[in-house]
Image: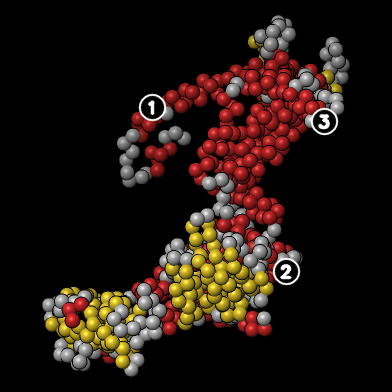
Amino acid sequence: MAGGGATGGSVQTDTYAGARGWLLLPAWVTLGILTLAPLAIMLVYSFLTKEFRGGVIWEFSLDAYDQFFFDRGLFGDAPPQIEWTYIGIFWRSIWQAGLATLLSLLIGFPTAYFIATRPEKQRALWVFLVTIPYWVNLLIRTVSMKFLLRDQGPLNEGLMALGVISEPLTIVNTNLAVQLGLFYSYLPFMVLPIYAAVERYNFALSEAAADLYAPRWTILRRILIPAVKPGILAGCILVFVPSLGSFLAPDLLGGARNFMIGSLIEEQFKGNAGNWPFGAAASMILLTMVLILLIVSARQSQKEAR
Amino acid sequence: MPSDTDIAVDVRNAVKRYGDFTALKQISLSIRDNEFFTLLGPSGCGKTTLLRMIAGFEDVTEGAIFLFGDEIEKLPPHKRPVNTVFQNYALFPHMTVLDNVGFGLEMMGRSKTEARKRAGEVLEMVQLGQFSHRKPAQLSGGQQQRVALARALAPRPKVLLLDEPLSALDLKLRKAMQVELKHLQRETGITFIFVTHDQEEALTMSDRIAVMSAGALQQLGEAREIYERPRNVFVADFIGDTNLLDVAVDRIEQGRAQCHLGGGHQLTCDAVEGIGAGANVHMSLRPERLYLSAEPIEVESLKGRVRETIFIGTDTATIVDLADGPQFTIRSSNSTRGNARVFEPGAEVFVNMEQGAARLLVD
């Protein structure tokens, strides 16, 4: 409905109506080349037949999806059973990403609240400080984290020197390391939207609640959190979605046992052992899940706005 | 103290400092139970700070605040049995009108059903019963104002604090709400502490007014007293319109002070304690207590010339230049009973004053 404005029968004529279509062209080209085309390619590839050494044969096939959901035995002729391997990896990814999101929320909310309640002149500085670590490439940060957390790393040695622990804690190659990695990778995405919401929050509402005999925790629960909920929701989505598909943190910090979807997909396109249609299908399934999540949360916030 | 029973709020030597800046300089005042009490002053005079100290949103740097004899200045706001109507209402946007009004009761430990029942009753009282299931954003400014009022009244506080609650309303609605608030105060018997910068609003509604300026109490008294017997220049100038003159006191005789002003004009008025002969002070003359005549009526009729005549609906204002002296504004009613003569600009006139119209002021 790009030309919909002309049918309105408005009295004023739109001088730029013609030009506007052309001016939108760069946006459409970018959107097309960078978003729609890759998605289309992904979708098509997921329905093709795999070539033995990577790549595809142009022949329609549901094998990729079938392989994801069903186990038909080693030779593919056994009666189909539900294949739990990949569903399990998905489930673990959701769990890991969920915990990372929760951790980000628990740390990010007080941080955002702290920044938003500083004097106005200081806030920009605090926001700037939060973003500084993100000037360093994600890969380097994740590798550095591995060094910090490993058995002979500064964290363990520091704790041992302080006498808190006598044996180094095994953190690297555990779920905890993955969660910490994801948390650290995406924390600003939690802090910034919540900060924006708390900054807009009318603190007179907290005063009004206190005036009406509400203690502090009740004010937080009944007044502040509902008022900044859109910011919290945005932050959770911005942390959860990239965490779900992430492969750097699980690969580098989690080791082989803590495989996540991102790594599974990455494997399919690496070297000669890959299975492109299967990787594409896994990507489409992941995308569908994220889309459902976004639609549900959008519905939810619409309902509350009413 | 036994005498505290009829004092609702007692502020004793309250001081508020923010770093080097002193927002309140040793304020002491007692607000009686069941009265409509107004804190009046220009913005920045400390009136809102004082109100917020009573509510508990600002801590008290020095001094004490008593509520019905109990010292409260250390209590957090949620433990003080007072409720506030906020300037911009501060209604909870995600709750319905009914839940907004019921919130205080719920926090006091009433059941949700009970809170809603009482909230419904209070909403009826402010004529908003049919809006109880709307969200605040779906109401007009005036309706939101009533919800804020209902929300603060629902827990039946003994003292209601109102922080410029009418300032966001248009003039007509504001006037209507003034009457309604006054009515509500009488009906409920709750002590109202009302903050405003609007002197007319203060005069209309209040039993007593505390006029504040620059963090200090300038005068405390009934509306009529403050209007007719202002204690200093600030109060005379801030409350209503007045002619403020520089005068010199020549002598005091039998409780009357004989003064002269620029141009050699003579005026006599009641002496005021603290102002003796030889003092250079100010005099306040309310415009509506002056009248014009073509011929001198008294010994002290002041001779002048009309500069301008301004029609302002109910009244006419005439600006007169005294011969070699200051400028005067005289107001006369436009009613036919007022039989005030309107003088054309340029006409020679005499300014006369009613008994007790002039008042000497300290700075």
**Mark 3 vs 1, N-terminal side:** 1
Amino acid type, callout 2: Glu
Q: Is residue A232 left or right of residue B292?
A: right
Whether label 2 touches label 3, CB < 8 Å:
no
Mark nearer the viewer, 2 or 1:
2
Crowding near the residue tagged with mark 2, few <14, some 14–19, many ≥20 C-alpha atoms within 10 Å? some
Q: Judging from the image, what secondary structure is the residue with disc 1 in?
A: helix
Q: Chain of mark 2?
A: B
Amino acid type, callout 1: Trp
Crowding near the residue tagged with mark 3, few <14, some 14–19, many ≥20 C-alpha atoms within 10 Å? few
- Is B99 in front, or is A305? B99
Q: Judging from the image, what secondary structure is the residue with disc 3 in?
A: loop
Q: Is residue B287 left or right of residue B26?
A: left
- In the picture, the quarter occupied by the N terminus of chain B is bottom right
In the rendered structure, find residue A22 and report the number of the disc placed on it: 1
Q: Residue at x 53, y 21 (%)?
A: A34
Q: Is residue A237 above or below residue B298?
A: above
As drawn, which residue projects farthest toward the bottom? B254
Residue at mark 2: B114
Q: Is residue A47 above or below residue B22?
A: above
Q: Chain of mark 1?
A: A
Q: Residue at x 39, y 79 (%)?
A: B230
Do discs 3 and 1 share a chain? yes
Q: Could you say where residue B308 lies in the image, as x and y percent from the top left? A: 18, 74
